[in-house]
Amino acid sequence: MTSPLASYPADSQRLQRAVHEHYEFVWRALRRLGVAEHSVEDALQQVLVVLARRLGEVRLGAERAFMVATATRVAADFRKMSSRRREDFDAEALERRVSDRPLADEMLDREWARRLLDVVLDQMPDDLRTVFIFFEFEDMSSVAIAELLDLPVGTVASRLRRARQSFEILAARLAKTRSTP
């Protein structure tokens, strides 16, 4: 079966360029928006399918913003699916699995911190979480986030302020529950 873009070489090149330029950014955004690591590639594939189908509707130069908006919706769907689905792990297979990472305290600490971060981020409202992630983890400016999410800069600033407050409250609450015997 041939691609629907095969008859439109310019669209095919545009799609390839968008994938090449924004793949890693969208992958990180999906992961930080709560998509489980083992599902990120599937979620990213969904984003790319939507982009390919609707590329003609996307304004030139707005591919990244379109992909992020789509990724936000896809991430919400994946989080809903994962909350309804129970994973059954094969304990023996996990024990047999050989890791290429060293078994160091630093790696364990990083993994623990990452899990705690995921717990806190999962509890934040999506609109605050998205702005927080792009500003704090992707080092994007408020202006860039506003352009990307098609929001006024003031709204981005307000959401970032509320997101930081929410993050601090949730992290403190989590730390308190973790330290209580």
Image (tube, grey):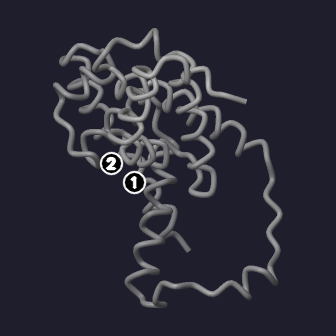
Measured as percent of width and height from the top left, residue 18 is found at: 37, 33
Q: Nearer the viewer, residue 95 or 59?
A: 59
Which residue of the protein is positioned furthest toward the top in this rendering?
Answer: 57
The tag on residue 168 is: 2
Where the C terminus falls, by quadrant?
A: bottom right
Disc 1 to disc 2, how far (Cα)?
5 Å
Residue that mark 1 sits on = 171
Q: Number of callouts in the render?
A: 2
* SS at badge 1: helix
Q: Which residue corresponds to the image point at 24% horizontal and 21% vertical from the top-left? A: 146
* SS at badge 2: helix
Where the N terminus falls, by quadrant?
A: top right
Measured as percent of width and height from the top left, residue 12 is found at: 46, 26
- Residue kind at label 1, given as amino acid type: Ala
Going by the image, does 168 lie left or right of 29?
A: left
Assess whether mark 2 and mark 1 are in contact (beta carbons under 8 angstroms): yes
Instruction: Please tell me how crowded label 1 is: few (under 14), some (14-19), or many (20+) other residues with Cα within 10 Å.
Output: some
Placement of 88 over or under 154, stated as above or below: below
- Residue kind at label 2, given as amino acid type: Glu
Measured as percent of width and height from the top left, residue 40 is found at: 56, 49
Instruction: Please tell me how crowded label 2 is: few (under 14), some (14-19), or many (20+) other residues with Cα within 10 Å.
Output: few
Placement of 145 over or under 86, stated as above or below: above
Placement of 56 over or under 119, stated as above or below: above
Going by the image, does 85 lie left or right of 129?
A: right
Going by the image, does 90 lie left or right of 174?
A: right
Measured as percent of width and height from the top left, residue 165 is found at: 30, 39
Q: Which residue corresponds to the image point at 63% horizontal and 45% vertical from the top-left? A: 42
Q: Quadrant of residue 45?
A: top right
Q: Nearer the viewer, residue 140 or 25?
A: 25
Q: Which residue corresponds to the image point at 46% horizontal and 89% vertical from the top-left? A: 102
Q: Nearer the viewer, residue 147 or 14?
A: 14
